[in-house]
Image: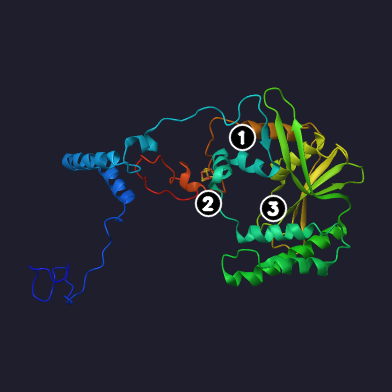
Amino acid sequence: MAGSGGSPAGEDGDGEPDRPGALPVTRPPRALTLPALVAELRTAITDPAAPAARRRAAAAELARLAAAGVPGAHPDDWWGLRGLSDDRPLVDEGKPVRVTPSAMESALRCSLRWLLERHGGSGPTSTAQGVGNLVHAAAMLAEDASADRGALLDYVAARFDAIELAARWMAGPERERAEAMVDKLLRWLATNPRRLLAIEHEFAVRLDDPNRPVDLAGRVDRLEVDEAGRLVVIDLKTGKSTAVTGSELAEHPQLGAYQAAVEAGAFAEFGDESGGAALVQLGTSAKDAREQNQPAAGEGPAAGWATALVRRTADTMAAATFAAVANSKCRVCPVRTSCPVSGQGRQVVEPPTVRRPENP
Ligand code: SF4
């Protein structure tokens, strides 16, 4: 502390000149709260490098706090020391598993991420998601190319301010992006050879199985019919990097789930023969929308693959264990701080590990 005795005249021993009344700014040892005190005591008694006397003293203090009912002081509250509370599967055998097409890709890519996001681990809606939701809503007004462009842009303008922007400067570029997507949608509609049956149509259908029935449910952006009378589900994509490669498209889980739904009779009032499904990319930097078509799932030597993929997803979602599988999306994974593969997630009683790169 400045001004303490024993220092050479004019200095306090750290080489800094004394300033009368000045106190050095240092990091406080911990907050003056009960939870911080409990945490420090728990750290002390579990630290094998701490002197035995210090660990004993910390244990005695913790015992005193536990007797006084302070939360976290009693070892019964140390969740990390407990065994598994329940090792049963998430869904009991014979009970239906609910699968939504939009969750399939996530569950198949990394089931731990799917599980944690499903139970509160997802992040808040991003600006890009907000813009995407608005464009989807505007697209409900555009049945075909005769849609009124001015009315669509007015719709976007009237609701744009409700989008939570990460920064004020983003308003101009993001609004231009939304308007560009509306224009791309209209140009795509002008060349779309199929006929519209329904927009934003909800569905729910059961895939029966005595061991594992699956309730496949969701909503399609557009349900169309091709010239052969087969149903084609269209999914509008508004992300900047949602385009998929040719090989990914062939077994794209979300499109496959839509086709499985068609074949299972989810749209029985319109038919049950699938003519394929398609992504329409509106959000990429390309000038025009890009339609990416998945062939009909009921044709060819791999017929039935889509329904099999839905069932595999249901098995993954109903399991007793969920695997962390490193993949190309780990860098932006919202639950990576709870993931052992990322190097950040650990049991609360384990010491922190050296941080590894975020993209395992
Ligand atoms: S960081 Fe990667 S491996 Fe870990 S939960 Fe997220 S997606 Fe899965």
Task: Decide which of tag 1 and tag 2 comes sooner along the chain.
Answer: 1
Ligand 1 near label 3 (Cβ, under 8 Å)?
no
Q: Give the amino acid at mark 1.
A: Met
Q: Label 2: which residue?
A: 331
Displayed quadrant of residue 348? top left
Quadrant in the picture for the N terminus: bottom left
Asked whether residue 293 is in view, the answer is: no
Query: In the current view of this chain or complex, which residue is farthest to the top?
Result: 210
Q: Label 1: which residue?
A: 317
At numbered mark 2, what does the secondary structure look like: helix, strand or loop? helix
Task: Decide which of tag 2 and tag 3 comes sooner along the chain.
Answer: 3
The residue sitting at 67% across, 36% down in the picture is: 98
x, y percentage for residue 126? Answer: 60, 58
- 325 relative to 214, above or below: below
x, y percentage for residue 25? Answer: 26, 67
Q: Give the amino acid at mark 2.
A: Arg
Q: Label 3: which residue?
A: 243
Task: Name the side, left or right, on which 320 lies relative to 74.
Answer: right
Q: Nearer the viewer, mark 1 or mark 2?
A: 1
